[in-house]
């Protein structure tokens, strides 16, 4: 199928970015998932994480994930240990300076990300690509901390990164064509599916998904269908692997409300504003799976 118009085509060219060493900044939920994916693709990974406990815990959890693949016969024990050996968790940002690509996945705060990018821009080689995994901040604003904003782009992975194939390659205001092209080829190298998009709030997928999840909550709040039936509707009528309310419980209701507020600020379209029911649930501590209760009960 050929699109009628295409300004930012993501049709694969030759997949080979030439990138063999990646630094990942932040080894939390996303950073550890991204490190896992890059190591599986045969790349050396320097994972910068200030918290020693997080470094240890998340390396162990990657090891556990890979062990399950061995147990199921999808990987041999040698490949598991080689993959783990390729990930080097460290505490200092300077250890990232030698990488060919840096993917920042630190906490979602603009001042933290700008400081990290300022230091990377000064310390890394000129042709190192600096990417951010931000979901809701402006890539252009993060890049503004750099002397060379043309080598800055977004690489937005989805959670859990080892499972979900999509990566949005975000072209910020000053990102060069060469940076977009190399970043897109890197995504192909790690066996993921790239789409190229502009630096607008929610990029492509969250722009579609956030209002849809809010609408699912509005249907539930009307009292015309149960949570189970709304989710069954999406699973059996739209072929979603998980319904929107179960997905909200997985993402965290607080995280979703925060993202909705940011999108509402940006677009001022009513579908982006979080429904009052969601805000009440967050105030009551019903945050989804992580608190044991959301649209479903997980306490047993
Ligand atoms: N969780 C998701 O579903 C999801 C999906 C896509 C993108 N993202 C984005 O990924 C980024 C990380 O999110 P997460 O869910 O992994 O958060 P997280 O809290 O699990 O991990 C963030 C990690 O960054 C570390 N950190 C804090 N300051 C740092 C610094 N200056 N240098 C290096 N590390 C630092 C923290 O110690 C923590 O371990 C955010 O920008 C978020 O918007 C999250």
Image (tube, rainbow, N blue to C red):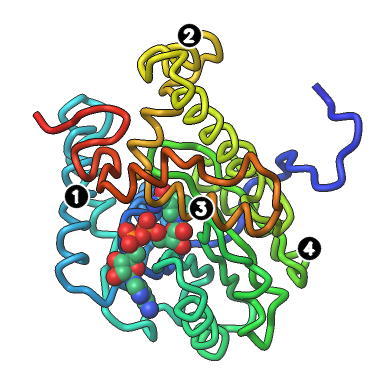
* Res 177 label: 4
Instruction: Answer yes or no: is residue 53 visible.
Output: yes
In primary-sequence order, the first of circles 3 and 1 is 1
Estimate the x, y position of residue 60 in percent, counting from the top left. 15, 54
In primary-sequence order, the first of circles 2 and 1 is 1
Above or below for 223 versus 299: above
Across the whole image, how many numbered discs are drawn on residues? 4
In primary-sequence order, the first of circles 2 and 3 is 2
Whether label 4 touches label 3, CB < 8 Å: no
Task: Work out how far the residue at label 4 is from the one at label 3, CA to CA, in angstroms.
Answer: 29 Å
- In the image, taking residue 171 as reference, residue 160 lies left or right, namely left
Whether label 2 touches label 1, CB < 8 Å: no
Task: Work out how far the residue at label 2 is from the one at label 3, CA to CA, in angstroms.
Answer: 27 Å
Q: Which residue is mark 3?
A: 259
Task: Work out how far the residue at label 4 is from the one at label 1, CA to CA, in angstroms.
Answer: 37 Å
Above or below for 210 versus 227: below
Q: Helix or strand or loop: what does disc 3 sit on?
A: helix
> Where ligand 1 lies, by image quadrant?
bottom left
Estimate the x, y position of residue 254 in percent, counting from the top left. 37, 50
The quadrant in which residue 13 appears is top right
- Along the line of sight, the residue nearer the viewer: 25 or 269: 269
Q: What residue appears at the point 70 percent right and 56 percent down from the top-left corner?
A: 200
In primary-sequence order, the first of circles 4 and 3 is 4
Q: Which residue is mark 1?
A: 61
Q: In what quadrant of the picture does the C terminus appear?
A: top left
Beta carbon at label 3 within 8 Å of ligand 1: no
Q: Which residue is mark 2?
A: 236
Q: What residue appears at the point 40 percent right and 51 percent down from the top-left corner?
A: 255
Task: Work out how far the residue at label 3 is from the one at label 1, CA to CA, in angstroms.
Answer: 27 Å
Estimate the x, y position of residue 94 in percent, counting from the top left. 39, 86
Q: Which mark's residue is nearer the viewer, 2 or 1?
A: 2
């Amino acid at each position: 199928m050929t699109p009628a118009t295409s300004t930012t085509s993501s049709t694969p060219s030759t997949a080979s970015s030439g990138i063999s060493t990646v630094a990942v900044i932040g080894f939390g939920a996303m950073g550890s998932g991204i490190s896992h994916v890059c190591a599986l693709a045969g790349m050396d990974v320097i994972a910068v994480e200030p918290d020693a406990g997080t470094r240890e815990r998340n390396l162990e959890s990657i090891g556990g994930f890979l062990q399950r693949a061995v147990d199921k016969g999808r990987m041999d024990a040698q490949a598991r240990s080689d993959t783990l050996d390729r990930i080097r968790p460290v505490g200092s940002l300077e250890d990232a300076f030698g990488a060919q690509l840096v993917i920042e996945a630190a906490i979602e705060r603009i001042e933290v990300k700008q400081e990290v990018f300022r230091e990377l821009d000064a310390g890394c080689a000129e042709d190192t690509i600096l990417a951010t995994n931000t979901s809701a901040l402006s890539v252009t604003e993060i890049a503004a901390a750099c002397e060379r904003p043309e080598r800055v782009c977004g690489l937005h992975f989805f959670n859990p990164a080892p499972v979900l194939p999509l990566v949005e390659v975000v072209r910020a205001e000053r990102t060069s064509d060469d940076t977009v092209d190399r970043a897109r080829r890197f995504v192909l190298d790690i066996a993921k599916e790239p789409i190229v998009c502009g630096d607008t709030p929610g990029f492509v997928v969250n722009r579609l998904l956030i209002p849809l999840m809010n609408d699912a909550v509005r249907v539930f709040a009307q009292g015309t269908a149960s949570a189970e039936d709304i989710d069954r509707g999406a699973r059996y009528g739209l072929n979603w692997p998980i319904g929107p309310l179960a997905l909200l419980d997985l993402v965290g209701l607080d995280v979703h409300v925060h993202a909705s507020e940011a999108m509402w600020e940006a677009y001022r379209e009513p579908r982006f504003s979080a429904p009052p029911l969601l805000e009440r649930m967050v105030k009551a501590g019903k945050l989804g799976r992580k608190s044991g209760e959301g649209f479903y009960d997980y306490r047993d």
